[in-house]
Structure formats: C-alpha cells, structure tokens
Amino acid sequence: MFNTAINIIQEEHRSLAAIVHGLKYLVNDARSNGARANFKVLRAMLHYIDNFPERLHHPKEDVYVFARLLTRTHEADEVVEELTRQHQEGGQLVTALHTQLDAYEAGEPGGLAAFGEAVDAFTEAMWQHMALEEKVLLPLAQKHLTDADWVEIAEAFGENGDPRFSADAEDEFSALFSRIVTLAPPPIGVGPSPGN
C-alpha cells in the first residue's frame, strides 16, 4: 500500500502544481501585456485551492502522515514542525489571494501589482512546501511508517478523488479542474486566447 499512498499524494501534488503554474502564468501574462485577467479562471483556481488542498489534502497530511510519523520517530520532528507551520501559513496566503483578487477585479489602483505579489508569495510557498514533502518527508515516512500505517493513509487519501484523473465525471473537483482547463487560454487550457 506504500506505493498506492505515495502515488495518490504525488498525483495530488501534480494537480496543485498545475493550478499554481496556471495562476502564475495568468498573472505574468497580465503583467506583460497590460490586459485585464480572466477573472472567471482566476476565481475558479482560487475555489479549487480553497476546497481541494486546503480542505482535503493538507488536513489529511496533518492527521494521517505527519501525526503518524511523529509517533514512529523523532527523526521527522523538525520537518513535520516546518510543514505544519507552512500549512497554517498557506491559509493566510490563500486569504491574501482572495483579498487582492477582489481589489484587482474592482479596479483599485495597483490591483494587478498587489494581486501579483500575493500570487508570487503563494506560488513560491507551494513550490517549497511540495519539494520539502517529496524530498524529505516522504522518504522519512517510507523509512519509519508501518504497512498498517500505509493502508490507512492510502484509504484516507483515496477518498479525495484526484481532480485531474477522477473516473467520476460528477466529482466536484474533476468538474472544477475541467472548467479551469476549458476557460483558461493556451498553454494552460483550451479556452479562447486573450482578445478572441
């Protein structure tokens, strides 16, 4: 079950990475061409971030991976403490994304610059966070967790349903991911190019 659990966690990271990359791309595109962003796409991306990583993925990491690892070894204490702090900080960064997107969409002076700074902070934090989990935490988990731990982790994460690959077309996150791909212009998605 170790491979199943790790695969699910890594696929969820890839889904989040796709959204993070898309968010960064749209902001950089707006910065470089001066056009107003596609707010429907940006709102859909923030909705995804609110509801998938913040509501499902991170809490399950806290409960099923971090807490379990702390009971098995002290070797992971520092990295779990740092990742837990990052989860808490992530919520604050997401709140800032919403606040700055509201201001940007309302046409406030400097709205794009402030939203861009919020996106930069969030994306940098997410890249660092996922790298720390995959390069440090998961190898420690592989070393110290038991087969029974991995069964429980795989079952818990298996309930999430990966937003990119869910077989259930009605799944909320699959539908949201599809909507983002449909709305977003290339190279993120298949929607209309800006100006069309």
Image (tube, rainbow, N blue to C red):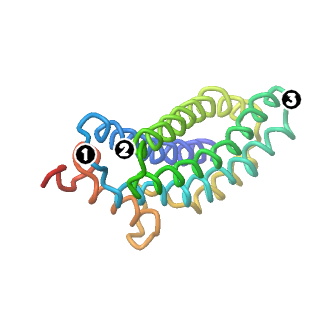
Q: Quadrant of residue 89?
A: top right
Above or below for 101 versus 135 = below
Density class for disc 1 (Cα within 10 Å; few <14, some 14-19, many ≥20) is few
Query: Given the image, on which type of amino acid does mark 2 rest?
Result: Gly
Q: Position of residue 8 (x, y in %)?
A: 54, 48
Which numbered disc covers residue 74?
3
Residue under the point 63% across and 44% down: 90
Q: Position of residue 64 (x, y in %)?
A: 73, 50
Q: Which residue is mark 2?
A: 22
Above or below for 172 versus 134 = below
The one nearer the camera, 34 or 170, is 34
Residue under the point 42% across and 59% down: 43
The one nearer the camera, 64 or 24, is 24
Query: Nearer the N terminus, badge 3 or badge 1?
Result: 1
Query: Given the image, on which type of amino acid does mark 3 rest?
Result: His
Q: Is residue 31 left or right of residue 123?
A: left
Q: Position of residue 16 (x, y in %)?
A: 48, 46
Q: How far, Cα to Cα, is label 2 from label 1?
A: 16 Å
Check the image and name the residue furthest to the left. Answer: 196
Secondary element at image label 1: loop
Q: How far, Cα to Cα, is label 3 from label 1?
A: 51 Å
Quick check: marks 2 and 1 in contact, CB under 8 Å?
no
Q: Is residue 15 visible?
A: yes
Query: Given the image, on which type of amino acid does mark 1 rest?
Result: Ala
Q: Position of residue 194 (x, y in %)?
A: 19, 50
Q: Which residue is mark 1?
A: 35
The one nearer the camera, 175 or 145, is 175
